[in-house]
Amino acid sequence: MGWLDALRGYAAIVVALFHLSPAVIGSDAHHTVLKYFDMGRYGVFLFFLVSGYVIPMSLEKHGSLRKFWVGRLFRIYPAYLTTIALIAVLVVANILNINQGLKDESVTGVLGHITMLHEFLGLRGLVWPFWTLAYEMMFYLIVAGLFAWGVHRHSAWWAAGLALVALVGGPRLPDALIGDSRADRRTLAIAVGVLFVAVLAAYISGRRPLIMFAGVVSIEFLALPLFNGHATKWPTASASWQALLMLSLLFAGTVIYRLHHGQVGRRPGGVALGIVLLAAMLTTAIHTGQARDLVVFTTASLAVAATFAGAFALRHRSMPRVLTWLGEISFSVYLLHLVVLYTIQYLIPADKRDGVSGHVTVFLVFAVSTLVVAWLCYRFVEMPGQTLGRKVQKRLQERLGPDVEPPAKAPAPVQRLEPITVTQL
């Protein structure tokens, strides 16, 4: 897992530096670079590939949806809720403002943040990085549903299928089919919240009929990005097709995992990855008609492919301790770096942030503060949360008994092949 931790740590730093960039090199230089290479998109796409690789491994290692969901909830919510609490403090102190969409639709916003699916309800998160959490949560739901029905090994179909729907469907897909008005979005948020809680309760119950039903509902959550990917101006995805494209990247990570472990043929796996790569490069430019989008998405996609392939090639080597450590605290770095940046910009007067010395000062203060705050969150929030999650898993096991195994019709693992090489990725 060292190479995956290193990739996670590297991706977190890339995203953090992308958001710091305007304060260090200036907005003009930042936007000039952005015309050719989007570091933020590059870092997030790397995160998606790593998550796509790790999540099925985590789920299938124990073969338990109960353990998976309890582990996930106690892995991500403690740091997530801590970040929200810190944001609330900054808002009260007038250091940070809540975006207007959340002010206008507070009920929808609260429910969206509880489920982490706010992007598909037409709202942006309290801070910008929260948008990726919506895609991660959507991916968890779909993968859990596929696992419940024993069809979780068909990752190549999902990766290629989502990418092709995004590429071919494009503007034909509705962006706000079930969330065009505030009242609709509030109703949708309530329905999503109820279904989300019901699905989790069913998975944790361990009862086969409930799990099978929850699996269907989980997969049907896909209707949100498919038909409601850009209900308002607030979501990060510019359209439903772009939301599907980002989900396809998560499934591309799963395809790599299955290729690595001989659970999918090299030809269908390679074709699926090729389709996702081409779609990632071309889809946005085709549907927007902007040549700039072709450059930005092509450079980011190729850089992601090269970076992941390079890390994969080095997977048997010891990773630098600093990178694996960054991987351990990467989630807290990702969540908290903008909170740190906003605080620094508030505390250091604008005239002190100008010039070379000011830029260097901001960079050093940001780097040190982000790493310290992230480590504190990891050490005193994330780690205790994971420990508590293991205790909850044990208590549920004692009270409810073991949860059921995957359905009998789940395909048997394909015999493990020889390890694939970078050129085959």
Image: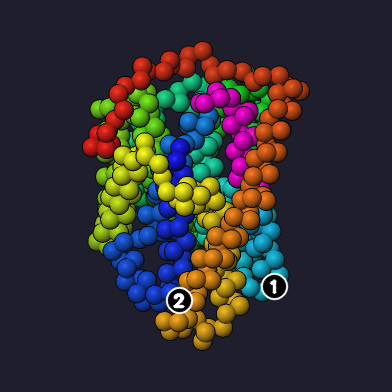
User: Mark 1: which amino acid?
Assistant: Ala
Rate crowding at label 1 as few (under 14), some (14 to 19) or many (20 or more) other CA atoms within 10 Å: few
Colour style of the rendered protein structure = rainbow
The answer to whether residue 71 is magenta is: yes
The single residue placed furthest to the right in the displayed view is 399
Q: Quadrant of the C terminus?
A: top left
Of residues 298 and 381, which is closer to you in this image? 381
Of residues 54 and 400, which is closer to you in this image? 54
The image shows residue 103 at horizontal and vertical percentages of: 64, 64
Instruction: Tell me the element at label 2.
Output: helix
Task: For residue 10, say whether it is visible.
Answer: yes
- Image side of residue 94 versus residue 123, left or right: right
What secondary structure prevails in the magenta region? Answer: helix
The circle drawn on residue 43 is none
Distance from label 1 to label 2 (Cα)? Answer: 26 Å
Q: Quadrant of residue 416?
A: top left
Q: Which residue is mark 2?
A: 360
User: Mark 2: which amino acid?
Assistant: Val
- Residue at 76% from the left image edge and 23% from the top image edge: 399
Instruction: Tell me the element at label 1.
Output: loop
Q: Are marks 1 and 2 in contact (CB under 8 Å)?
A: no
The image shows residue 1 at horizontal and vertical percentages of: 45, 37
- Residue at 39% from the left image edge and 32% from the top image edge: 257
- Residue at 35% from the left image edge and 74% from the top image edge: 29
State whether residue 399 is above or below residue 78.
above
Of residues 129 and 71, which is closer to you in this image? 71
Q: Which residue is mark 1?
A: 93
Q: Which residues are magenta?
A: 60-79
Q: Nearer the viewer, mark 1 or mark 2?
A: 2
The single residue placed furthest to the top in the displayed view is 408
